[in-house]
Amino acid sequence: DAGITQSPRHKVTETGTPVTLRCHQTENHRYMYWYRQDPGHGLRLIHYSYGVKDTDKGEVSDGYSVSRSKTEDFLLTLESATSSQTSVYFCAILQGGTGNTIYFGEGSWLTVV
Amino acid sequence: DAKTTQPPSMDCAEGRAANLPCNHSTISGNEYVYWYRQIHSQGPQYIIHGLKNNETNEMASLIITEDRKSSTLILPHATLRDTAVYYCIVRGKGSGNTPLVFGKGTRLSVIA
């Protein structure tokens, strides 16, 4: 599992409230990613980080912000949650070596009502 | 957009080999072929990757054609627990700035 922990695993929140999802890794990987997965769209990249305080946007970044103040934690924040952000969110890390393989966490299920 | 083409679904009898094809005709010389699978409600699971040589690990074998325009993932003895969506992804090794781009994959159903 490449030492990835996502929290919370399940959350229900109301429209307009802020929500933060946390991805924690224990193996000092430089690159971390946030994806979302929706029926009919597959997995889509939201944001990624290539080091402490270094982040960049992915394919579907609108409505999301991220922060990485420590190597081990990559936070995804929905400043004002909307129903369209109801989804499953996956964190991933890049493990270096041959092929630079990406490994995923178990997911965080978010429902915005 | 995904650079690969996979059949939307396949069936395989339990205990038989499952052969999942993937076309990647526009692959470039420095791009690897990666295979992941996703079992319902779980995070994508890395299976195997290769550049041009055939590869084998404890989970599967990857056969890449000589022209590298297609590949086949082989699960030698499929079990019911191998029922999942399988994704074939082409990606340059380069750096982490090149994230995975997922297509729709192949839904493999292993039948008892």
Image: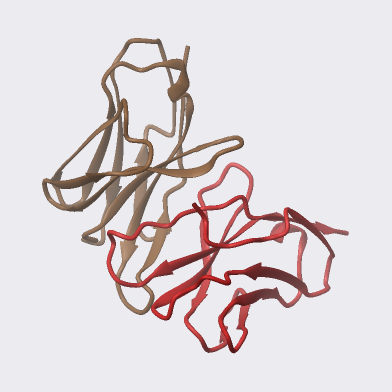
Question: In this rendering, would B16 be left or right of A102?
Answer: right
Instruction: Give residue A7's position: percent from left, percent from top.
Output: 35, 36
Instruction: Give residue A81's position: percent from left, percent from top.
Output: 35, 17
Picture mark count: 0
Q: Quadrant of the N terminus of chain A?
A: bottom left
Q: Residue at x 57, y 69 (%)?
A: B24
Q: Is residue B34 above or below residue A103?
A: below
Question: In this rendering, would A38 be left or right of A28?
Answer: right
Query: Looking at the rendering, which quadrant does residue B4 occupy?
Result: bottom right
Query: Looking at the rendering, which quadrant does residue A45 occupy?
Result: top left
Question: In this rendering, would B89 be left or right of B111?
Answer: left
Q: Which chain is red?
A: B
Q: Is residue B76 above or below residue A90?
A: below
Instruction: Give residue B17's position: percent from left, percent from top.
Output: 78, 75
Seen from the viewer's position, the closer of residues B59 and B31 is: B31
Chain A color in figure: brown
Q: Is residue A72 above or below residue A60?
A: below
Q: Residue at x 21, y 51 (%)?
A: A72
Q: Residue at x 88, y 59 (%)?
A: B112
Seen from the viewer's position, the closer of residues A74 and A39 is: A39
Q: How is the image coloured?
A: by chain
Instruction: Give residue A29's position: percent from left, percent from top.
Output: 24, 61
Q: Residue at x 37, y 52 (%)?
A: A92
Seen from the viewer's position, the closer of residues B6 and A103 is: B6
